[in-house]
Image (tube, helix red, strand yellow):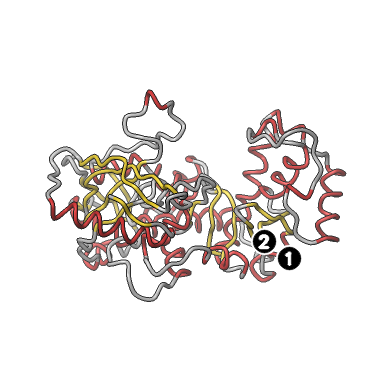
Amino acid sequence: MSALLVSNAQARRLWLSTHGLANTPTGKADLAQIIHDIGFVQLDSIRHIERAHEHIMWTRNQNYRLGELDKMLKSRALFEHFTHDASLIPMGFLPMWQRQFQRTADRISAAGWWRKMPDAEGRAEIRERIRQEGALSTRDFDSEGPRLKEMWQRPPHKLGLDYMWYAGELATCHRKNFVKYYDLAERVFPEDLRLQSLSEAEQIDALCRTALERLGFATPGEIQRFWDACSAAEVRAWIEQNKAGLIPLQVTGAKGETQQCLGLPDIVARLESAPEPTARLRIINPFDPAFRDRKRTEHLFGFYYRNEIFVPEAKRQYGYYVYPVLEGARLIGRTELKADRKAGKLRVANIWPEAGVAWPASRQSRFESELARMARFTGLIAEP
């Protein structure tokens, strides 16, 4: 079968539509549907203007209010586990996630410093305490010395709690001021989903298929990176086994180059039905799932982006926490924002338009309107 040529404009439309960024972000917010469609929402502890997961949801529907994701976690609509990072995932995906519990537990066990965690008997004592007392955070356990953030310096009880969480023995039942509370998995995961048994092959099929559904079109590497719950070899084997039902594509990049990708059988209908993105300007979080895969972003949008949070200040090209700016189907620039909570102000430190992008008064006005909306969401007043 010859490959279907997908233009860059088609690819962008489908990608933004699939990720909830094509329509004006207004109207009634169906949060469960938003998260189901994008697959997961990454959690991040840094509260720069607002925490990443809250900003990600608000970007898609500006009727979203702070704390609604916490309510969904408490109501068991979502569960928390590790994709490429800690993320909130629709509870309905739990059956295909069983192998990921074991994979992450095996991976961390291979790191030597995890040997400091309690042994099986010690972990059983932690479980029993949670069984008797209910959900506990790491702060409910005694530890000697200061609370250090580096994984290899964490106290044994913290390593034990995390190991059991990775392994699916414990689960996050809620967070309070972003502090994780651990409970027994059987008290968090609905029984019908927890006991649903899928074979290894069925789980891999579900992981690859749901990834490709959300990507729309993808290289094998992009399928693998989406959930980060299969190995590259497992994805290649899945593609080989299912090649008769996959559509070969040539997806055109921003600079005119093409990339070999795959799509599901409905790809033509999806390309034809993808709407033209709204011209609404949006300030995008650096951890937004639509742009998390930096290679994909660069290919589709010609937009080079790297998070410089952990780059020494003197070596940063832009700034500590820089937000891409999306307008229609283009990433037109980036901005560094700063929250002065004492003064109650949201301030613009810098704006960097992309090469070749003009920034007239009309565009600045749209930017300031979005900044004002973002400020209201975070309880601040915009000061451009």
Residues at circles 2 and 1 in contact by the CB criterion of under 8 Å: yes
Residue underneath mark 1:
187
Q: Residue 323: percent from the left, percent from the top? A: 34, 45
Q: Residue furthest top?
A: 314
Q: Residue furthest front?
A: 343
Residue name at image x 19 percent, y 50 percent: 8
Q: Residue 98: percent from the left, percent from the top? A: 63, 55
374 in relation to 325, above or below: below
360 in relation to 306, above or below: below
* Residue 137 in the figure: left or right of residue 298: right
* Residue 133 in the figure: left or right of residue 77: right
Q: Residue 251: percent from the left, percent from the top? A: 24, 48
Q: CA distance from mark 2 to mark 1?
A: 9 Å
110 in relation to 94, above or below: above
Q: Residue 349: percent from the left, percent from the top? A: 31, 41
Q: Residue 307: tell me if it is visible.
A: yes
Q: Secondary structure at mark 2?
A: strand
Circle on res. 173: 2
* Residue 363 in the figure: left or right of residue 38: left
Crowd tier of the residue under label 1, counting other residues whose Cα lies within 10 Å: few below 14, some 14–19, many 20 or above: some
Q: Secondary structure at mark 1?
A: helix
In-front residue for pair 248/301: 301
Label 2 amino acid? Cys
Q: Earlier in the sequence, mark 2 or mark 1?
A: 2
Label 1 amino acid? Arg
Residue name at image x 57 percent, y 48 percent: 82
Instruction: Answer with the quarter of the image where residue 242 lies.
Output: bottom left
